[in-house]
Image (cartoon, rainbow, N blue to C red):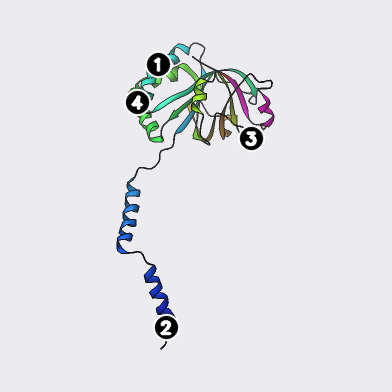
Amino acid sequence: MRVHATSVKMKRLRKQEPSSRVRIFIICLIFFATLAPAHSQAVYFVSLAWIKPDGQAQYEAFLEQVQPIWARHNMEVLTRTRVVDLLAGADQTIPPVEIAVLRAASQQDFRAYISDPQYQAIKALRLEAVDRMIVLEGAAKDEPQLNFIRSAPQFAVILGNSETPSMRPLLDIAVSLQGAIKGEVSPPFNTVVSVALLALSFDDNPLSFLEELGPQNQVYVAAVLP
């Protein structure tokens, strides 16, 4: 008696098929997975502010009033610094007065903050206090060392136009957007692809990292404000 090869294969396939209960279980897993909220990635903002000589008090007033609004929308200032020196690059531009790094828990939280009526009511304070302000937005490349960022007294703030793979900064942001709150995003800031915070120590050669950077990078020394 001959058995057709195709019939034998079909019987084997039927034996390998999952039971109806298993199929229903798999379908339910897929369905509930689609209902689960997507993972929200933290968003980082680097604010470069050219504050007017007579605008510091008004700028401080804005920051005081905006703090509870940031907290309500899961945003925080990781560090706020005063630029004290330019180590590399951007010789043709006036350095910003302050550089601050903010963190939002998600892009949704940031959008909610922007549309908050209380923020809308006070943002003119900041606009009037600055000659120019640029914001760089992005995501952290690696797990940021937030506790060290909050406790460090000063940083090298590196605005990168090229990758620096051998560096180990406390925070390394892959910049995805550049925007101006006031003024324009002009060279060399419109070519920045990363921002890194490197804590400056009291080692024998704390600036040795400069040897690893390309010529297009900008490096500022920034002291943390109280």
Q: Earlier in the sequence, mark 3 or mark 4?
A: 4
Direction bottom: furthest residue? 1
Say if mark 4 contacts mark 2, CB within 8 Å. Answer: no
Nearest to viewer (mark 4 / mark 2): 2
Q: Nearer the viewer, residue 175 or 165?
A: 165
Part of the protein shown in magenta: 201-221
Left or right: where 168 falls relative to 180: right
Q: Earlier in the sequence, mark 3 or mark 1?
A: 1
- Amino acid type at circle 4 is Arg
- Amino acid type at circle 3 is Ser
Query: Where residue 97 appears, x then y in whole percent?
Result: 54, 18
| Mark 1 closeness class: few <14, some 14–19, many ≥20 residues within 10 Å | few
Which residue position holds label 2?
4
Q: Residue at x 30, y 63 (%)?
A: 20
Q: Earlier in the sequence, mark 1 or mark 2?
A: 2
| Mark 3 closeness class: few <14, some 14–19, many ≥20 residues within 10 Å | few
Give the quadrant of residue 127: top left
Q: Earlier in the sequence, mark 4 or mark 2?
A: 2
Which residue position holds label 4?
72
Which residue position holds label 1?
64
